[in-house]
Amino acid sequence: MGLKVPRNPLSKSQIFLRDDRGSLSVLILGLFMTVLVTLMILSDISSVYFAKRSLTQATEAAAQRGVRNLDLGAYYRGEYNITSFIRNWGGGGEKDPGIPIDCEKGRKDSIDAISEFSKNRESLLSSQLGEISVNQISCDGYQLSIRTSATARLPFIIPFINIDSVEISSHVGAFDERKITTNYYGIDIGSPNQG
C-alpha cells in the first residue's frame, strides 16, 4: 500500500482566475473606455480653443472700434505751419507716433462693442462662451488696450474631475497709423516707389 498524496484541487475561484476565456473582451472594453475618454477630452479642448478664439475676435473688434475715434484737437495741433512743411519736404518726414485717439469716446465705443457681441451670440462658436466682462481698458492717446475675460462651458464633464467650465481671457491692443504718402499739404511730389 503506497502512500497516496492528495492532489491539491484548485478551487473554483482559482480556476476562474486562470481561465483565459473572456480576457479579450475585457481588453476591448478597456480600450473603448480609453478612446471614449480621450474623445471627450479632445472635444473639451477644442471647445475651449474656439471659445478663446471667439473672445479674442470680439476683443479685437472692440479695440478697432475704439481707435477709430479721432482726437481732432491733437490731430490738427501745429500741423500746418511753415516749419513742419520745410522739415517734411526736406526729407525729414513726419515723426508722428500715430493718429491721436479720443480716449473717452474710444472706451465707450469699445464697451458698447463688447456688450453688442455678448447680446448677439447666435453662432455655435460663441454659444460656448459665457458673458464677456471687460477687466481693463487703457488708452495713452495713441493706443487702446483692452483686457477681457469670459467663462467657456465644456460640452462634456470628465469623470473624476468634475470641471464644467474654464475661465479664459484675452488682451488686445490697437493703434491707427498714417498711410505713407508723398502728398504734403496738398502738393503731390511723386510716388514713394519711383526711382
Image: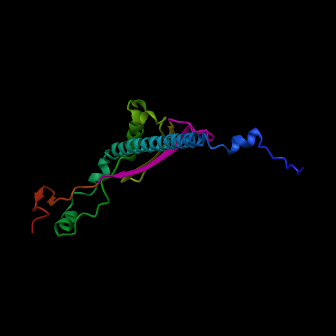
Please provide percent x and percent y for residue 157. 56, 36
Specify whether residue 134 is in view. no
Please provide percent x and percent y for residue 55. 43, 42
User: Which is nearer the eye, 121 or 11?
Assistant: 11
User: Which is nearer the eye, 31 or 8?
Assistant: 8
Q: Residue at x 74, y 43 (%)?
A: 14
User: Which is nearer the eye, 157 or 177?
Assistant: 157
Q: Please tell me whether residue 20 belongs to the stretch shown in magenta.
A: no
Q: Residue at x 13, y 55 (%)?
A: 186
Where are the magenta residues, as a range? 155-176
Report which quarter residue 69 is drawn in: top left
51 sits to left or right of 166: left
- Decide: is 3 above or below 21: below
Specify whether residue 121 is in view. yes
The image shows a total of numbered marks equal to: 0
Q: In which quadrant of the rendered image does the C terminus lie?
A: bottom left
Q: Residue at x 14, y 63 (%)?
A: 192
Please provide percent x and percent y for residue 82. 19, 63
- Decide: is 104 above or below 186: above
Please provide percent x and percent y for residue 121. 40, 31
- Decide: is 129 above or below 71: above
